[in-house]
Image (tube, grey):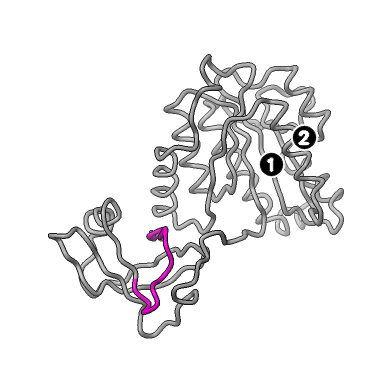
Amino acid sequence: MRQYVAQIGLSRDGTLSVSGKDYRYMKQVLRLAVGDMVDVRLPSGSLQPMTVCRIDDRARAIMLQVCAETAPAEPAGADLSAASAEPSVVFWLFQFIARSAKMDVIIRQATECGVQEIFPVISDFSQAGAKERNFRGDRYERIIKEARQQSGSAVATQVREALSFEEALSLWKERCASAGEAGACGFVLYERTEQTLPLYTAISRAQNRAPDGVIRHVALVCGAEGGISPAELNRLVQEGFVPIHFKTNILRCETAALYGIAALQTALAEGDVWQCRE
């Protein structure tokens, strides 16, 4: 399901004006005409069906109107830009910084999967210059927006500034210790078998440790080209991360990130099914 991700809320009369690059997306990608309907993801995270009521090709602008048969998903004129849709399981990705083109792919795919936060991490195998890379610029905002519009993701994915390895560990430790947080668990994808567990065994143990048996927040650590060093793996284990190993072919780092996110999401979403089969 494609959608348009709006950067501003509805006006007081229930309309939304689209121009610039967003005009091109609606006109050339979605191929909308007057009278067509489009799903708009509002800043609140809610999905609002809207109708194209006017197209001004000279001004390169499109006017959208809330559909007559639907109530506005948010109060007209309200400032809800800081709000977001909260998924049942929040995913964080700690991605060891890979080459620029591969990071583009990882961020796009993680966004499509609904990962909430992506933290680039400077690791032992990251290339020189990784610390100077800017991950908060317009480039990645565009990649995320396009990925959300293509996939229909309700999650407002964010890419954060690059962190050192120790900063990443401290951040996750603080998150786990935050007030009211329960069912938080961290996993690390490891290309070798030492210290690793099969995916479903790792999830079962994490569920057993959760106060009510429900995992609500997952952190996944993925290596760059060359993987994760033994020293980094040992530190991750010391901080409570569980190494998991997939019995599959050798995966590129951009493939491994997508594979790991998808496998974890599927296992958590279908937990009742596989637990009944054990």
- Which badge, 1 or 2, comes first in the chain's sequence? 1
The answer to whether the residues at label 1 and label 2 have Cβ atoms under 8 Å apart is: yes
- Residue 169 vs 176, above or below: the answer is above
- Residue 159 vs 22, above or below: the answer is above
From the viewer's side, name the closer residue of 260 and 155: 155
The segment highlighted magenta reads: 2-15
Secondary structure character of the magenta stretch overall: loop
Q: Residue at x 65, y 56 (%)?
A: 269
> In the figure, residue 170 lies in which quadrant?
top right
Q: Which image quarter is the N terminus in?
A: bottom left
Whether residue 7 appears in magenta in the rendering, the answer is: yes
- Residue 68 vs 2, above or below: the answer is below
Position in image of residue 133 (x %, y %): 49, 26
Callout 2 amino acid? Phe
From the viewer's side, name the closer residue of 277 and 179: 179
Q: Residue at x 53, y 48 (%)?
A: 157
Whether residue 120 appears in magenta in the rendering, the answer is: no
From the viewer's side, name the closer residue of 117 and 163: 163
- Tell me: 25 left or right of 2: left
| Dot 2 crowding, Cα within 10 Å, few <14, some 14–19, many 20+ | many
Q: Secondary structure at mark 2?
A: loop
Position in image of residue 132 (x %, y %): 51, 22
Q: Which residue is mark 2?
A: 241
| Dot 1 crowding, Cα within 10 Å, few <14, some 14–19, many 20+ | many
Q: Residue at x 73, y 39 (%)?
A: 172
Q: Which residue is mark 1?
A: 219
- Residue 48 vs 273, above or below: the answer is below
Position in image of residue 189 (x %, y %): 67, 31
Callout 1 amino acid? Ala
